[in-house]
Amino acid sequence: MSGTKPKLDTKSNITMNRFLSSLLLLLSITSSVSASRHSFIRSVNEASLFGVRGGGLFGGKDDTKEAEVEQAEKKMYPAMTQEEIEDWMEHIPVFAVTDANGAGVILKPDEDSSVFYFFFNPLAANATLTQLQKVNEGMELKVSAFSLGKIWFKLLNADPNQEVLLKAPDSDEKKSTTGVDYRLVPDTKDLLGARMLLTMSPEDSEKLKTGETMTQEMAQKAIQKAMTESPKFKETFNEIPVFTIAQMRMQKQAAEGETGEPVTLLPMYFSLQNMVGTWQQFMSSAAPEMQGVEPAINLMSLHDLVSMMKKESEIDFRNVVLVPAAPEGEGQPAATGAPAGPANAMAGMGGATLGDI
C-alpha cells in the first residue's frame, strides 16, 4: 500500500491520528495508577470478538445495514492441530521466577494452594523476583524466559491434577503435589487498554477525536469506568487481550533459495501501543486515497482465539501472526538474572526448565 507521499492535512486523518495519540496518552497517564489496583470479579460469558468498524466499538451500535451476502458456499479452513498452535505461539516470550537451575518458584498463599505466575512483561517478573529475594535471602533466584507455545498446553491448559514435585527452600526433600494453579499475567497497560476500549462511550470518543486536553480527572474517570463496567477482561490473569486492525497486513517473503509469491499475513498484537504506533507509521507513508481510512480495531482474548483455531473456520488462522510486545526501552531493573526484554529473551528459551517442558 505504498505510493506517492500523501498529504497529511486531511480532516479525517488529523482527527483519527489525534484520537489514537490521545488514547495512548490516556493509557500512559492511567497505567501507573492502575498498576496498584486489581479486580477479581468473575468474568461473564460475552461474545469473544469485539470489533470496530466506523466507530462501532467506541460509539455503541453501528446502525448501518449489513451488506447482503451471496449464498455461495464459503471456503472453510481445517482446524489447526495442537502442534501447529504450539508452533504459532513458539516465538512469544513469557517470564517467570525460577531458581538457578530453572526450576519454577511456586508460591503458596496458604497451605492448600500452589500458584505459579508467567508474565508477559519482564518488568512484572522482575518486581516479583525482588519481592521474593527479600524474604528468601538464601535462595539464588532469577527471571527466566519461556516460550508461550511450549507452556500453553503442557502447563497453562493441562490437567490440573497432574503431579508436580515441590521442594521447600530450606530442605532437600521433595514431595509430590497436584493442583498447581498456573497463571498467565498480561501487561497491566494492555489489560487496561482492553477494558477502556470496551467501555468508551461515543462522548468519550469524540472528546479524544477533537483533541480535548487530557486531565487527571478524565484519566481517573476512565480508570473507574474501565475497572467497573468492562464486560470482559475483568481478571488480572488468564484473560489475555489480543489487538488487531482489520486493514493492516504484513508480507512474508519466500525464504532464501525458494520461489513463490509473498504470503500476506494478518498481524495480531499483545501490545495496544505497538499496534497503534505501527498503524500511525503505516499511515504516514500511505497513498493519499488511504488517508481517510478509519482503523477497524478488533479485540479478543487469546484463549478464545485458540479455541477458534481448534475448529474448522472461515478464517485461515495459518496466515495470522502474533506480534510480541516490543521492549519498553532501557532502564530495566538490575535484578540478578533479569532479562533485558523480549528482544534478547528468545535466546534463553527452550531449555530444560520447569521440569521436562
Image (cartoon, grey):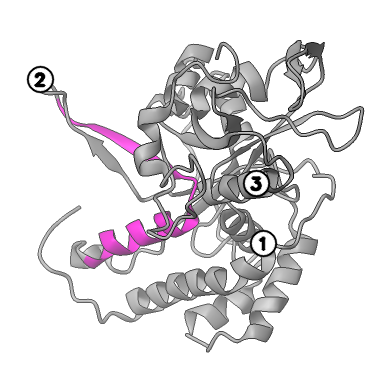
Query: Where residue 236 appears, x then y in whole percent?
Result: 72, 48
Dot 1 amino acid type: Ala
- Of the numbered discs 3 and 2, the one sitting upstream in the chain is 3
Residue 128 tag number: 3
Is residue 320 visible in this depiction of the protein?
no
Query: Where residue 146 appears, x then y in whole percent?
Result: 50, 29
Reading the image, the residue beneath label 2 is 259
State the residue in front, 187 or 318.
187
Pointer 3 and pointer 1: residues touching (CB < 8 Å)? no
Confirm whether the magenta stretch covers residue 278: yes
State the residue in front, 153 or 69.
153
Reading the image, the residue beneath label 1 is 35
Would you call the spot at circle 2 few (<14 residues within 10 Å), some (14-19), or many (20 or more)?
A: few
> Residue drawn 38% across and 59% down?
330
- Of the numbered discs 3 and 1, the one sitting upstream in the chain is 1
The Cα atoms of the two marked residues, 3 and 2, are separated by 48 Å
Dot 3 amino acid type: Thr
As drawn, 185 above or below 226: above
> Residue drawn 47% across and 85% down?
211
Please state if 319 lies on the left or on the right of 212 as rendered. Answer: left
Q: Which segment is the magenta one?
A: 261-284
The Cα atoms of the two marked residues, 1 and 2, are separated by 49 Å
Pointer 3 and pointer 2: residues touching (CB < 8 Å)? no
